[in-house]
Amino acid sequence: MAKPPRPSAAVRERSYPPPFPDGWYRVAGSHELRPGAILYRECLGAQMIVYRGENGRAQVMSAFCPHMGANLAGGCVKGDRVECPFHLWQLAPDGSVAHVPYADKLPRARHRIWATRERYGQIFIYHRGAQIDAPPPYDIPSIADIDDGRMVYRGRYDAGSVHMHLLEFGENSVDFQHFSPLHGQMFVPWTRLRVPGVQIQHEADWEDDPEHGHVVRFKNHSTLRILGKLRPETRGDSVATFWGPAGIVMFRITIPKMGDILFFQTHLPVQPLEQRVWFHWFADVKMPRWLVYYVVGNWISQWRNDLDVWENKVHLRKPLLVKGDGPIHRLRKWWKQFYPEGVMYPGDEADDGGEAERAAE
Ligand code: FES
Ligand SMILES: [Fe+2]
């Protein structure tokens, strides 16, 4: 597939819903943050520092000191507090001013903090576009197989920045008709090199989770066709769980007779139409390392095919769908919950959630 020229950012941006839906997002890997370290991040329409207190806890707060705006990333960690480099004020993890070297009476105003969790070697924050002090409506998932040691950490890959809206990743899973043209060919894992004579046949489906409104699962069964012959023994099953709006997506891939691989694909919206993407994976203790690397690399090759489209397209609010297209509008209706008041297209409070379009599905 030839890569088209990228349309201007302005044309693309104005076609999409807002860029920062509410949800949990990975802001750093645990390995990047030794005790006492401070990282600076610009993402989700904000500037923040991620730091680790001397007690070992990761915390996230607004980057600019509430006193006179110095960048706290230039400061240092004292215990569980951050000390500003300018006049040496200290801020506590709850955002309160804990110490001013030259004043006894401390200001009562709170500095902005984000709910922060560190799980499975990654640091996540909860972003919300409104009522920013309210607690997160749901937590980071617990993964029993990792917690009890049946699955172990096997690697990570920093995929850098990609130029797309987060919604594209969600819609992709229900876009059943793109699997054959974009993912019907086997590639050498981690590369764009086609494997001649090997095609992949997909059967895709999805379900929401009656107990967790923020969760959907996409299932895919893939079988290889080698030199034109379908080989049922090559069938592999995967489930992609969206834990909110694609900030955290967990893929579980089952290889018959070998075991399971679980990898996180996380997207951090850095600015409109820019996502920072990381992969971070675990596998059954007995799964050979080469096989895990092969399977993850296979997915990443396929993902790059999608990127060629996502990075150069616009969003159509009323796509011209026909019978056989997947449930795009149902996915969008689910996605709406991640915007304040459930409004996906600002200025259009009368948004009907695509009911009219759904009727056509
Ligand atoms: S600007 Fe931070 S202490 Fe003054
Ligand atoms: Fe795809």
Image (tube, rainbow, N blue to C red):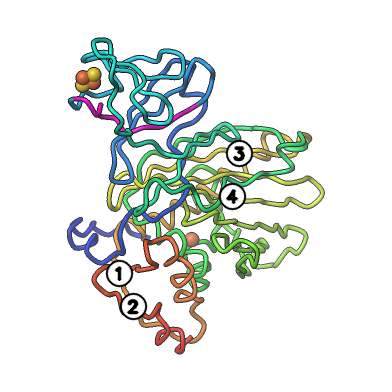
Labels 1 and 3: the sequence-earlier one: 3
- Distance, label 3 to label 4, CA atoms, is 9 Å
Q: Which residue is mark 3?
A: 281
Q: Horizontal and vertical percent for residue 281?
A: 60, 39
Q: Which residue is mark 1?
A: 345
Q: Horizontal and vertical percent for residue 45?
A: 28, 45
Q: Which mark is residue 250?
A: 4
Labels 4 and 1: the sequence-earlier one: 4
Question: Compared with residue 343, is residue 100 higher up or lower down, i.e. above or below?
Answer: above
The reply to whether the C-beta atoms of the residues labelled 4 and 1 are less than 8 Å apart is no
Q: Quadrant of the N terminus?
A: bottom left
Q: Horizontal and vertical percent for residue 22?
A: 41, 54
Q: Secondary structure at mark 4?
A: strand
Labels 3 and 4: the sequence-earlier one: 4
Q: Callout 3, which amino acid? A: Trp
The reply to whether the C-beta atoms of the residues labelled 1 and 3 are less than 8 Å apart is no
- Distance, label 2 to label 3, CA atoms, is 39 Å
The reply to whether the C-beta atoms of the residues labelled 3 and 4 are less than 8 Å apart is no
- Distance, label 1 to label 2, CA atoms, is 7 Å
